[in-house]
Amino acid sequence: MDRFLTIDSKKGGNGDIWMRLVGFYAVADLLPGFKLRICIPSYFGTLAEFAFGDKLIIVTDNSCKSDLEYTNLGIRHLYKDLLKGKRFISPYQRSVIHDKKKKAFKDYVNTWIFNAADQLGIVQIPAARWISVYQGYLDIIGIKKLRHISYDDFTDQVEKNHPRLVEKFLTPVPASKDLNIPEDLHEHIVIFPNGTGRQFVPLWWAKKHMPDAYYAFFANDNYAETFKNAGLKTIRFFRSEDIVRLAQEARWTISTDSFPSHLLQTAMNKCTILVTGTLKGRIVSPAFKGKVVDADAICHPCLHLARDLHPLCAAGHSECINWHMHTYTSNILKSVYELAGHS
């Protein structure tokens, strides 16, 4: 008899949510006795159904009660819901503490508390030894019912699924009616340069090294105006489907290690992913066959700090210092010229 497992995966960054879907898609093959219902934000529904709907039940409303819910909150913020019987998955607690350069006493206390909560099954967390692996595995391995899945079996299945997913995305994804796709985009590189942290491409770097590329921004991203006013070519997109559609039409695609990179890793291989602050192994799919430019900064990896709240990173910089590293820039340009057919 099939067993249903319903997971509320609406919490977290967009990239986190997408990597979980990649993870659960692999689990669906590894554990065919489970029927996986994954609750996600409504704006993901169309694309998630397109990519993963053949093996996962995608839910975008509140029509079903979840068995577990992802959270990034501490125990003191969860205790009222815990007393009501709700159960949580917390993959972030370990990774945040792991990435700190200096650990405080409260970090060790929190680790002990979460270990106890995991033993009780009320807040489930992944084992510390998986902290540096692909997050699509890290996020699902905390779930007790899935904990027996080995990383080797998981990565093998992700690699088996990858050609199937890429083939799906050979079909043009329906774009927003307001998306303006430049007629000459097939001759150019499209770059997704932004992110909520310090991974954004600085304007000076774009002008100096890739002035002929198209720079794609979410519709309400004010950073786009800075690029446009500097004479760079910009594109506004409106939905997650637009990210994939622009990449499908472009000669080559570059993305910082932000949300667009996760969609692109699933959809295609004609792409370069730029790693800035995050561990490469944590955010790059083991099945991705495109190019990856790893961070070159001595302070890498670093904590993700939203730049609208923190004007400086933990090392005291307003922009990631990778952009000032000769090797980092050289590797970006090399990936484009070698693989996109530039002379």
Image (cartoon, helix red, strand yellow):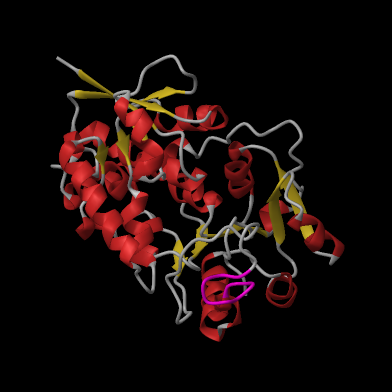
Q: In the picture, residue 175 is in which quadrant?
A: top right
User: In the current view of this chain or complex, which residue is farthest to the bottom?
Assistant: 326
- Above or below: residue 315 compared with residue 21: below
Answer whether residue 316 is magenta in the image: yes
Q: Looking at the magenta stretch, what is its main secondary structure?
A: loop
Residue 218 percent across, percent down from the top left: 69, 46
Residue 293 appears in the picture as rendered: yes
Viewer-proximal residue, 115 or 157? 115
Q: Quadrant of the N terminus?
A: top left
At x 62%, y 61%, the residue is 307
At x 59%, y 58%, the residue is 252
- Above or below: residue 213 compared with residue 79: below
At x 51%, y 30%, the residue is 41
Residue 145 percent across, percent down from the top left: 17, 34
Region rendered in magenta: 312-320
Viewer-proximal residue, 89 or 149? 89
Please count the marks in the image. Answer: 0
Viewer-proximal residue, 27 or 38? 38
